[in-house]
Structure formats: structure tokens, C-alpha cells
Amino acid sequence: MKSAVNLLFLIVLSVLHTVCGLYFHIGETERKCFIEEIPDETNVIVNYKVELYDPRSGGYMPSSPGIGMHVEVRDPDDKTLLSRVYSSEGRISFTSHTPGEHVICMFSNSTAWFSGSQLKVHLDIQVGEHAINYGDVVQKEKLSELQLRIRQLLDQVDQISKEQNYQRYREERFRQTSESTNSRVL
């Protein structure tokens, strides 16, 4: 029985793609895009911070006020959900309305003033219940510790349900593709 519970726990952890933290280097005129598979009606928060390469010190320093990031988010139907210029450090949030691969693109808003410089962008993408700041929820709704834990569990169950529905959707599309391919072959 205990091994079944452990197996279920591992399956749930592997299914839920929740947080991705990374950094990447980008030229000021380059564009970097990331693809996230997101179920419908799911909250997504993207935190980022830009640092500018300093050739004198050979390291990265906080970027100047003039450098920011243009962020564009497109849904699986290639509709733009968000397209805006942000400062050199920020938080972007959106809710998916269509299940599938969402594309998050980032590029510098800088002009020729700093052309040729390298930027280091720290990126953290939080999907689902991990995008909820429960500290704010406790203060806003004045929840007890038990009420907060129940709220977290309900949010996790809701996210698991959304993931399952998304996997069913993907399975149906794959089945349609397989049947179509099979009918053409035979």
C-alpha cells in the first residue's frame, strides 16, 4: 500500500510542470522564446531580471534604467495575449484560456546606445498553484493555518484536474492524427 502511495506521488510530481528557473545570455538585438505547455484557465507568473555585461570588470552588473525587456506571449492559436515593454526587472502574469503550447518571447528594448552589449536574463516561470502567493492570501482573507492548508490542497486538486483534462485533450488529438495517418496508409 505504501509503495502505491509513493508511486502516485511520483506520478503527480512528474505530471505537474510547475517552476522553471534559469538564466540565459542574449545580445541586445536578439530575441529568445520559450514554449510552455499550459492547460486552459491556468495562472502563469514570469519573473525576470536583466543584467548588463561590463567589459571593464568582466562580469554582469544591474542594468541601467534605459534597458528593459519587451515581452510577448502568444497562445496555441498564435493570438497575442500580451505584448508590452517592461523595466529591467519585473513580474508578468497572465491566464491561459486555450490549452496547449504558449510561446513567451523576450527581447531588449534598447537602441543603438548600447548596441553590441551582452545581457544576462534571469527567468523564473511559475505555472498553476505555484503562481499563487499564499502569504498575500493569508493576509487578505485572514486565514488560519488549517484554512490555508485546505486552500492549498484545493488549489492543487484543481491544478491536477486541469492537467488531466489537458492530457485527455492531447490524447484525443493524437488519436485523431494516428487514425488519419492509418487510414491514408491502408
Image: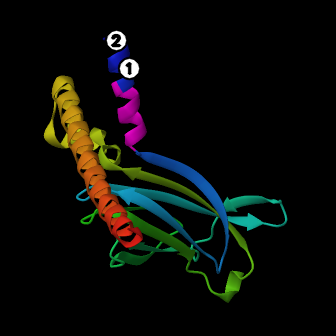
Q: How crowded is mark 2: few (under 14 residues within 10 Å), some or many (20 or more)?
A: few
What numbered label is drawn on residue 2?
Answer: 2
Residue 154 quadrant: top left
In the rendered structure, which segment of residues is drawn in magenta? 8-16
What type is the residue that disc 2 sits on? Lys
Q: Name the residue under label 1.
A: 6
Q: In this view, does 133 lie to the left or right of 36?
A: left
Location of residue 172 in the rendering, given as x and y in whole percent from the top left corner = 27, 58
Q: Residue 11 colored magenta?
A: yes
Q: Do the residues labelled 1 and 2 touch (CB within 8 Å)?
A: yes
- Residue at point 58%, 52% (across, down): 22
Residue 94 quadrant: bottom left
Q: In terms of depth relative to the viewer, which is nearer, 70 or 170? A: 170
Tell me the quarter of the image containing the N terminus.
top left
Is residue 96 something one can see in this rendering? yes
Q: Is residue 108 left or right of residue 165?
A: right
Residue 110 quadrant: bottom right
- Residue at point 53%, 56% (across, down): 123
Q: In terms of depth relative to the viewer, which is nearer, 120 or 73? A: 73
Q: Residue 132 colored magenta?
A: no
